[in-house]
C-alpha cells in the first residue's frame, strides 16, 4: 500500500486541485468550439490543448526556466511571434479594395475607438494607466498586436490579455451580428455597392512601401509589426519573390501559429491565471469588441450623410482587424437579407485597414506609455 501511495503521489492525481480542473474544462471548451463550431479552429484548437498542457498537475510548464515549454514560450514573452504572424498576414492580404476605395480606411480607423474606450474602462476598474493601455488593445480584435503590446507594457497580464483577445476573435460570428442588426435598418442592409475599380500592379507595389513610411512616421513604436506586414505584402505583390511569399503565407505562419497558440494556452496555469484581474480583462474584452463593432457601423452611417453613392453601413463592423472572419460575418448577414448582395470584397477594405489601424494604435500607446 505504501508503494501504491508513493506511486499516486508522482501522478497528476496526487496534485490535483479545483483551479486546475476549472482551467481544464475551459481548455476542453476551446477545443470543442474550434472543432465542432469551427470558431477560429487554427487558433482555438492549439490554445485549448495548450490550456490542457499547462494545467495538468505535475507537468513542467512555461514558468519553469529552461524547460521545453519555457523555451517555446520565449517567442511569446519576447514579442518574436507577433511580427512573424504579421509577415504571413501581409503575404496573404490583398489591399486592392482598400486602394480602390481609400475612404473605407476611415472605417478601420473608427473601429479602433474600441481600444481607447477599453483603455479608459480598464483604468476605471483599477488598473494602472500602463496596464490599461495593454488591455485596451484587445479592442482592436488583433491577437498578435495584443500580445506584442502586453509584452512591452504589462507582461504580468500577458496570459489573460492573449486569451481574451483570441477568445473574442473566435466569437466574432456570435458577437457582431446582433450589434449589426441593432444599429442598421433593413433598407441599409439591402444597399448594394459598386464593384471596385481595377487596381494597377504598380499601385499594388507602391502601396506597402508608401504605407510603411506613412504609418511608421506616425507610430514608430510599431515599426516591427508594420514593417513585417508591409514587407510580406511587398513579397506577394512584387511578382519576383513568389517563393518567399508562399513560404511566409503557408509554412512560416502555420508553424508560428502552432507554437504561439500552444504557448499562450500553456501560460494559463491556474495559479497565475485565475485572478480577479483576469476576470476584469475578460469582461473588458467583450465590451471592447462590442464598442469597436458599433463604432464602425455608426461611422459608416455618418459617412453616408455626406456621400452621394452610399456605402452599406454593415461593412463598418469589419473595421475590427479579425481578418477575414469579420468581413465574412458582414457578408453572411447581408446574404440573409439579399442573396444577391455580395459584400465580402467591400468589407475586406475596412478589415485590412483595421489591421493597420490596430498596429498604429499599439505604436502610439507604446510611444506614450512605454517611456
Image: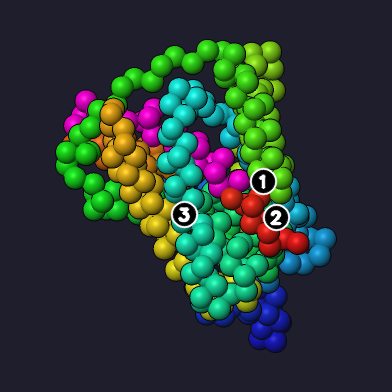
Q: Is residue 298 above or below residue 52?
A: above
**What is the span of residues highlighted in magenta in the rendered image?**
338-360
Q: Secondary structure at mark 1?
A: loop
Seen in the picture, residue 132 relative to 214 is either above or below; the reply is below
Q: Is residue 18 visible?
A: yes
Do the CB atoms of the residues marked 3 and 1 lie less than 8 Å apart? no
Q: Which mark is residue 219?
A: 1
- Dot 3: few (<14), some (14–19), or many (≥20) neighbours within 10 Å? many
Q: Indicate the secondary structure of the residue bearing disc 2.
A: helix
> Which quadrant: the N terminus?
bottom right
Q: Residue 338 at x, y = what percent?
A: 19, 32
**Residue at the spot of label 2:** 367
In the displayed structure image, the side of residue 229 where residue 40 appears, left or right: left
Q: Can you tell which mark lies on residue 113?
A: 3
Cα distance in 3D space between marks 2 and 1: 7 Å
Q: 259 or 180, which lies in front?
A: 180
Q: Earlier in the sequence, mark 3 or mark 1?
A: 3
| Disc 2: CA contacts within 10 A as few (<14), some (14-19) or many (>=20) | some
Q: Position of residue 139 (x, y in %)?
A: 49, 56
**Contact, CB < 8 Å: mark 2 with mark 1?**
yes
Q: Earlier in the sequence, mark 2 or mark 1?
A: 1
Question: Is the magenta region chiefly helix, strand or loop?
Answer: helix
Amino acid at each position: 500500500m505504501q508503494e501504491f501511495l508513493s506511486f499516486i503521489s508522482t501522478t497528476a492525481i496526487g496534485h490535483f486541485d479545483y483551479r486546475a480542473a476549472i482551467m481544464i474544462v475551459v481548455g476542453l471548451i476551446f477545443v470543442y468550439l474550434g472543432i465542432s463550431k469551427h470558431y477560429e479552429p487554427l487558433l482555438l484548437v492549439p490554445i485549448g490543448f495548450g490550456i490542457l498542457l499547462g494545467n495538468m498537475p505535475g507537468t513542467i510548464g512555461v514558468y519553469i526556466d529552461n524547460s521545453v515549454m519555457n523555451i517555446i514560450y520565449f517567442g511569446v514573452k519576447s514579442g518574436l511571434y507577433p511580427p512573424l504572424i504579421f509577415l504571413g498576414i501581409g503575404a496573404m492580404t490583398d489591399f486592392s479594395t482598400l486602394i480602390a476605395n481609400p475612404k473605407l480606411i476611415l472605417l478601420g480607423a473608427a473601429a479602433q475607438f474600441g481600444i481607447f474606450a477599453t483603455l479608459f474602462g480598464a483604468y476605471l476598474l483599477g488598473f494602472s494607466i500602463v496596464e490599461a493601455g495593454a488591455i485596451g488593445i484587445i479592442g482592436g480584435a488583433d491577437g498578435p498586436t495584443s500580445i506584442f503590446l502586453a509584452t512591452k507594457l504589462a507582461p504580468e497580464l500577458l496570459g489573460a490579455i492573449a486569451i481574451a483577445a483570441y477568445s473574442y476573435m473566435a466569437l466574432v460570428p456570435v458577437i457582431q451580428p446582433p450589434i449589426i442588426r441593432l444599429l442598421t435598418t433593413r433598407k441599409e442592409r439591402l444597399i448594394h455597392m459598386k464593384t471596385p475599380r481595377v487596381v494597377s500592379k504598380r499601385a499594388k507595389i507602391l502601396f506597402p512601401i508608401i504605407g510603411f513610411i506613412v504609418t511608421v512616421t506616425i507610430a514608430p513604436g510599431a515599426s516591427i509589426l508594420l514593417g513585417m506586414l508591409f514587407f510580406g505584402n511587398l513579397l506577394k505583390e512584387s511578382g519576383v519573390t513568389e517563393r518567399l511569399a508562399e513560404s511566409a503565407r503557408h509554412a512560416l505562419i502555420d508553424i508560428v501559429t502552432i507554437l504561439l497558440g500552444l504557448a499562450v494556452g500553456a501560460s494559463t496555469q491556474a495559479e497565475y491565471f485565475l485572478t480577479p484581474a483576469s476576470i476584469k480583462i475578460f469582461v473588458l474584452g467583450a465590451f471592447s469588441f462590442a464598442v469597436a463593432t458599433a463604432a464602425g457601423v455608426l461611422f459608416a452611417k455618418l459617412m453616408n450623410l455626406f456621400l452621394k453613392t452610399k456605402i452599406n453601413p454593415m461593412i463598418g463592423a469589419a473595421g475590427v482587424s479579425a481578418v477575414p472572419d469579420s468581413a465574412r460575418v458582414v457578408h453572411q448577414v447581408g446574404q440573409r437579407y439579399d442573396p444577391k448582395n455580395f459584400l465580402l470584397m467591400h468589407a475586406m477594405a475596412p478589415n485590412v485597414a483595421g489591421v493597420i489601424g490596430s498596429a498604429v494604435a499599439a505604436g502610439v500607446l507604446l510611444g506614450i506609455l512605454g517611456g
